[in-house]
Image (spheres, rainbow, N blue to C red):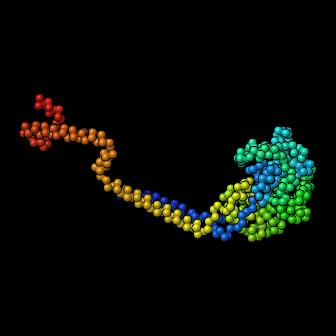
């Protein structure tokens, strides 16, 4: 008995200790939470500028004139585009290596469907439809929300020239330009940078509005277009970036920390992060001090008036401590109630338990039970009286005499 009680007490203490440790750990978790949005409102920087990723790809087929027009209508700060040089030297916009995903090349040129886009002449590229895929595949589940006129316009989009996109962007937007590398056997392998620069400068767009991303031929670009914002997609230390004349970074948001952003900002380096589509992520980057983001959902982020999770440290601590106190009070209350309930159960005796069970029965069942008990008492009384009479006739005391069956006694009397 002693060992069993000791074992039970030890197991209960072990369970309580483990439970207590888990509760304390949960209470202290907020100490490990580090969010840029736990800050004073007065320290919040300006809202990050929004750059449309290949235009406005949720509202129109990517890298098409319609997509860039929609981005302009959303009053985005700028647009990002991928530049390819055709086989006959025309800069156009295409992200993928092949034309299969975003055009109907398999229908028009089935034998050329798997060829790289830079192997096509412009006269062939302009025959392709670059909008029907958007309505069929509906990559962002937004095609169904287009108006009738927008639906028809999207269905008739074609491959877009760089020059045509720049005509839309030159008065209101900045542009981030990325390039696909050409193979050495391409006719314009050695001159595609010059062709692109010429196209940009002839468009009339301000040089300060152009963020030049390719790392190749930076020296040539600085000489021909010194006003371009030299942009890098490689994360590096501040000194190295300065030596290369980099003014802006274009990085995936998962590659940087709040400390990185503060360091780059202090060094007068602008940071653009991609791809940022959700308001909560946009809010965190806003609190972290990011200057701009590239997004597929510019129409959504442009409507975010304030970071959704911005909270002063004092308010955060008050909520945390209040929640802990309330939960601790509930836990203690539950333990006290459970102890009181178990203590009340131990005070019940068997008669009380049987009576409680009987009370819960229906009145008919209780009546039947009472009748059975009455008849049982009567039968027992009759048997006892017969036995006493028999013993007295024989001169025996009722002590030590075994009880006789009522049927046996009846036979003897007969």
Left or right: where 166 falls relative to 12: right
As drawn, which residue projects farthest toward the top? Answer: 414
The answer to which of 82 and 184 lies nearer the viewer is: 82
- The image shows residue 97, relative to residue 256, as above or below, that is above
- The image shows residue 113, relative to residue 95, as above or below, that is above
Inspect this view and state whether residue 251 appears.
no
* Image coordinates for residue 216, horizontal then vertical, percent: 86, 59
* Image coordinates for residue 26, horizontal then vertical, percent: 54, 61
* Image coordinates for residue 227, horizontal then vertical, percent: 86, 65
The answer to which of 172 and 221 lies nearer the viewer is: 172
- The image shows residue 301, relative to residue 153, as above or below, that is below
Determine the image quadrant of residue 281. Answer: bottom right
User: Which image quarter is the C terminus in?
Assistant: top left
Tell me what residue is drawn at x 75 percent, y 44 percent: 148
* Image coordinates for residue 302, horizontal then vertical, percent: 72, 58
Tell me what residue is drawn at x 70 percent, y 67 percent: 45
User: Which image quarter is the N terminus in?
Assistant: bottom left
């Amino acid at each position: 008995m002693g060992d069993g009680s000791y074992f039970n007490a030890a197991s209960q203490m072990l369970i309580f200790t483990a439970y207590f440790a888990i509760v304390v750990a949960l209470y202290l978790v907020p100490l490990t939470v580090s969010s840029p949005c736990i800050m004073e409102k007065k320290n919040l920087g300006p809202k990050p500028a929004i750059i449309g990723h290949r235009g406005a790809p949720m509202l129109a087929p990517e890298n098409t004139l319609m997509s860039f027009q929609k981005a302009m209508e959303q009053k985005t700060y700028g647009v990002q585009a991928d530049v390819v040089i055709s086989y006959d030297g025309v800069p156009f916009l295409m992200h993928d290596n092949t034309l299969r995903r975003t055009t109907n090349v398999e229908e028009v040129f089935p034998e050329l469907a798997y060829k790289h886009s830079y192997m096509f002449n412009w006269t062939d590229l302009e025959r392709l439809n670059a909008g029907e895929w958007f309505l069929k595949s509906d990559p962002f589940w937004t095609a169904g929300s287009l108006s009738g006129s927008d639906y028809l316009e999207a269905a008739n989009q074609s491959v877009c020239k760089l020059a045509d996109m720049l005509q839309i962007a030159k008065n209101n937007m900045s542009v981030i330009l990325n390039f696909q590398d050409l193979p050495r056997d391409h006719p314009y392998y050695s001159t595609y940078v010059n062709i692109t620069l010429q196209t940009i400068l002839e468009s009339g767009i301000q040089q300060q509005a152009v963020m030049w991303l390719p790392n190749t031929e930076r020296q040539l670009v600085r000489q021909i277009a010194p006003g371009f914002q030299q942009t890098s997609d490689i994360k590096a230390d501040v000194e190295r970036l300065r030596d290369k004349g980099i003014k802006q970074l274009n990085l995936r948001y998962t590659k940087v920390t709040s400390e990185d952003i503060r360091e780059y900002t202090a060094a007068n380096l602008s940071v653009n992060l991609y791809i940022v589509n959700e308001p909560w992520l946009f809010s965190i980057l806003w609190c972290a001090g990011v200057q701009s983001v590239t997004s597929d959902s510019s129409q959504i982020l442009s409507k975010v008036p304030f970071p959704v999770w911005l909270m002063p440290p004092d308010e955060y601590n008050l909520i945390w401590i209040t929640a802990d106190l309330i939960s601790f009070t509930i836990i203690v209350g539950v333990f006290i109630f459970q102890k009181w309930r178990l203590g009340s159960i131990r005070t019940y005796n068997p008669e009380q338990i049987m009576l409680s069970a009987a009370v819960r029965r229906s009145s008919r069942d209780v009546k039947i039970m009472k009748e059975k008990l009455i008849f049982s008492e009567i039968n027992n009384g009759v048997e006892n009286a017969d036995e006493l009479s028999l013993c007295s006739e024989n001169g025996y005391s009722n002590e030590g005499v075994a009880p006789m069956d009522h049927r046996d006694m009846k036979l003897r009397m007969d």
